[in-house]
Amino acid sequence: MTNLIPTGIELAYLAAAVCFILGLKKLSSPATARQGNTIAAVGMLLAIAATLLNQSVLNYELILLAIVAGSLIGAIAAQKVAMTAMPQM
């Protein structure tokens, strides 16, 4: 029974990788780009959830600090960069 959690985490990582690949493939066309972003976001959600559920993670404070720092940097960049310059970011 204890082997189910690591197996579930590995499956979540695999599903996340598949979502990333499919998301990138769909980003190649303007008609499917929105769907590609959604699929890639689901992949990121799976990867983050799998990481946080992993029992070998010892320092949740460091993860929270990284999330806050990344959010602040992203919010500042979103305010300063014009929408037409987003592909270059």
Image (cartoon, rainbow, N blue to C red):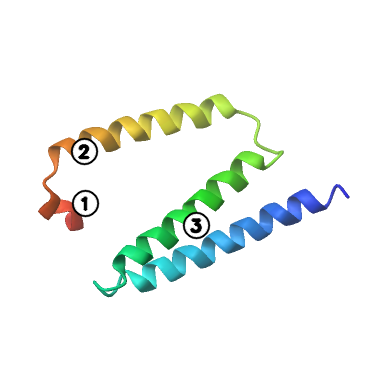
- Mark 2 is on which residue type? Ala
At mark 1, the secondary structure is: loop
Name the residue carrying label 1. 89
Left or right: residue 11 compared with residue 33: right
Indicate whether 21 appears above or below 58.
Answer: below
Look at the picture and state if 49 lies above or below 25. Answer: above
Residue 66 x/y as whole percent = 44, 32
Sequence-first tag of 3 and 1: 3
Asked if residue 68 lies left or right of residue 4, the reply is left
Residue 51 figure quarter: top right
Sequence order check, earlier mark of 2 and 3: 3
> Which residue is pictured at 60% across the width and 57% down the height?
13
Q: Are marks 2 and 1 in contact (CB under 8 Å)?
A: yes
Q: Name which of mark 2 and mark 1 comes first in the sequence.
A: 2
Q: Give the answer, above or below, for where 31 lies relative to 63.
A: below
Whole-angstrom CA distance, mark 2 to mark 1, is 9 Å
